[in-house]
Image (cartoon, rainbow, N blue to C red):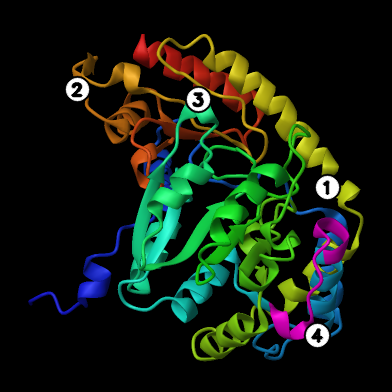
Amino acid sequence: MNNQLSDRINSLATSATLEMAAKARELRAAGKDIIGLSLGEPDFNTPDYIKEAAIQAVNDNYNSYSPVDGYVDLKDAIITKFKRDNNLSYTQAQVVVSTGAKQSLYNVAQVCLNKGDEVILPCPYWVSYSDIVKLADGVPVEVPTSLENNFKMTPTQLEAAITPKTKMLWYSSPCNPTGSIYSKEELRALADVLQKYPQIIVVSDEIYEHINYGVTAHASMAEFDDMYDRTVTVNGVAKAFAMTGWRIGYIGAPAYIARACNKLQGQVTSGASCIAQRAVITALLEPVSRISYMVDKFKERRKLILGLLKDIPGFKCNEPEGAFYVFPDVTAYFGKTLNGTKINNSSDLSMYLLEAANVATVAGDSFGNNDCIRISYAASEAQITEAMSRIKKAVS
């Protein structure tokens, strides 16, 4: 039978992180001892106080459809969180709760982009940005950054990327995959450029906000009065609260964008899980200090993996300031043959490490930077140590 699928889906790339995780699971099921460092998923359990709130919600018989954009008291909790942590003031109409921050991003692209609109993406970027933009008929415009500049886009680069078709700028801070954080001063410098182009909407993805190692304080683009009305702040509970499977994300945005997202979501998924929403109220209203033990552990693992990477020839790395990834430059191996396998790019190396070292990583090309690979350190110290030992042996 002929392929009856749409051009849209036929041209869509598979999520590289999910694809590598699936390959790792297949190999594990086949008896291979795979160490998975490909997924951005904390290896902690959801804290008990959050689980207890979910159990209470079940016992309180929360089982009906929730409002499309989230329960009123959850939106109140999000408003409280934005004010407490980010000094941002939002109203109920400006907040939309979705089934994960990925849906939040998808909604924003769908309601803001017309065919041919350009979206500036500082590279590297989170794997799904580019395809989410394409699904909305937008055009991703990649702006390369360098290890030497901690993978951060400069105001000069931003200005050079802007054209009459530019509609949006998307970035994450702390960044997935690099862990880099834009300081308030760096964001202000980008905002100064954007003052000349009032049509450009900014999407600030802050999902890793609380996984910050204290080098650069977290800052939000929407904190600036002259950017507040054109910035969508995206966040969620997956990373810092170890709630990846609960699937709750949210935005604070200009009301017209938020209401458009609500309209779209009402025709797609409707409201997010009622039980998960009730648990997130507790997660957001409790002191952030209650999750600091996870951040402290990630900081220890960052020190461990950076030390081990220094002993692997050809891996060049900066020190991430947040999130739980390293993004080493591996171009030293391009053009070389390792145990009979020719390495031409990051994808070749990542697949080689999976097959030869039984370690799952993610190639940098899917993040818009083919010079690097992403390695997650959301794993135990023993797993990290063993994985780095295997990688060192495989490339030596």
Q: Disc 2 or disc 4, which is closer to the eye? A: 4
Give me the residue at 60% from left, 57% from top: 205
Q: Earlier in the sequence, mark 3 or mark 4?
A: 4
Q: Does residue 18 appear left or right of residue 383 in this picture?
A: left
User: Was residue 284 drawn as part of the magenta stretch in this picture?
Assistant: no
In the figure, residue 84 lies in which quadrant?
bottom right
Q: Earlier in the sequence, mark 3 or mark 2?
A: 3
Q: Earlier in the sequence, mark 1 or mark 3?
A: 3
Q: Which residue bears the numbered disc 2? A: 342
Q: Tell me which segment is drawn in magenta.
A: 83-95
**How far apart are labels 1 and 4 at the CA level?**
25 Å
Q: Which mark is residue 291?
A: 1
Q: Earlier in the sequence, mark 2 or mark 4?
A: 4
Give me the residue at 62% from left, 34% from top: 379
Q: Which residue bears the numbered disc 4? A: 72
Residue type at mark 2: give it.
Answer: Lys
**How far apart are labels 1 and 3 at the CA level?**
32 Å
Residue type at mark 4: give it.
Answer: Val
Q: Relative to residue 298, is residue 168 depicted above or below?
A: below
Mark 2 residue element: strand
**How far apart are labels 3 and 4 at the CA level?**
45 Å
